[in-house]
Image (cartoon, rainbow, N blue to C red):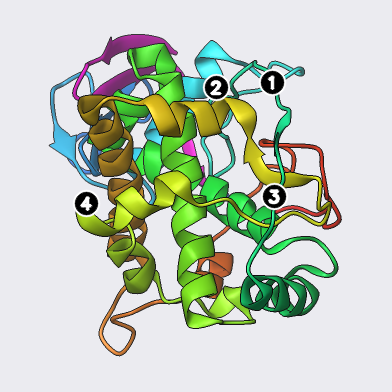
Amino acid sequence: MTIQGAGGDGAVRLRMVRPTEVSPGRLLTCPTCGATGGIALIAVGRQAEAACLQDHIWQDRDLCASAVRQLLHLTWYPPDDGCILYPYPSDAVCEQLLPDLVEDRSLTPGGPAARDDISWEAHASTATTSSSSAMMFCLMYARCMGALAVPADGSLYARLYPKVGGDAVCAHMACLLVALALYDTGRRSRLVKLSRLPLRAVRAALQPARADELRSLRPISRRPEVWLLRATDADRLQHADAETWERWRQAAADIVDDVLEDYARPGRENPQLFHLDARPRRFPDEATWYTDAERKWQGTW
């Protein structure tokens, strides 16, 4: 496998020396000359195509931009057994491309919360997350949404994936803002089953006028002495200049837009959060990407 390009626009080109199995028992094959070896996999924007050594270019039903970018990630960070395989089915997300910030994970000291918010949190955490907190549920799904969007969308990939020049802090803050938007949408509507959150309402919470309110939002924790927000993030939210804030907000909005593009369809124009569970995801759950506190639910996405 040879990396032939990883552009700043999210474009990726990989030359595969050996034949590539893109689904069980099916090799990627040039429809013009029948070649199976030496094929280049190309991802540009949200589209993917293949090119053989004879410069025949085609699209394949099992080839997608997300899988090509995940394959590139595996060449840079190979698994322990060294076995690098094309992720399939083609829309599966098998690799987590979002970076983890290595920093102090201490949570913000707590304070008084509104009685109505406490009541909603108690009901939502019990109904939705099996005795964990509502915000932990939102953090997990925000991370999931980022994992789906970043390899699939060339612009997000270029902005948020550090190996091609993306900003790790922006990636972290974008996921946090998605989580805060999920939490705030549920809190405002008093929705108990957060899996029923409509994604267009979440996207509305990331509009410029509404999103400013997220900077001061402090999610309730199961421990009254802390809010479920890192102290480092509270500081970033408070002190970010207008340009930095807008970069984080736009990245968060783009993540939700990408998920909406994937999941909205005729008869389901406003998909809900639980619809994300239908898509294959094979990385371990991300309950601890943000904090070890209150982790109750374990499993795989």
Q: Nearer the viewer, mark 3 or mark 1?
A: 3
Eye-nearest disc, 2 or 3: 3
Q: Looking at the image, is mark 4 or mark 3 nearer the viewer?
A: 3
Assign the N terminus to one quadrant of the image: top left
User: In the rendered structure, which disc, 2 or 3, sits on the residue that comes first in sequence?
Assistant: 2
Q: Nearer the viewer, residue 93 or 196?
A: 196
Say which quarter of the image contains residue 259.
bottom left
How far across and down, in percent of the image, does residue 93 sit?
Answer: 53, 46
Three-letter residue code for mark 4: Pro
Q: CA distance from mark 4 to mark 1?
A: 40 Å
- Residue 228 is left or right of residue 224, and the answer is left
Query: Label 4 vs label 3: CA separation?
Result: 27 Å
Q: Residue 74, which numbered label? A: 2
Q: Amino acid at mark 1?
A: Pro
Q: Assess whether mark 2 and mark 1 are in contact (beta carbons under 8 angstroms).
A: yes
Which numbered disc flags the more N-terminal residue, 1 or 2?
Answer: 2
Q: Would you identify the image quadrant in which residue 121 lies? A: bottom right
Residue beneath disc 1: 79
- Mark 3 nearby-residue class (10 Å; few <14, some 14–19, many ≥20): few
Whichever of callouts 3 and 1 sits on the residue coming sooner in the sequence is: 1
Q: Is residue 19 magenta?
A: yes
Residue 48 picture location, percent across and down: 25, 40
Instruction: Compare residues 41 and 285 and report the one nearer the observer.
Output: 285
Measured Cα–Cα span from mark 1 to mark 2: 7 Å
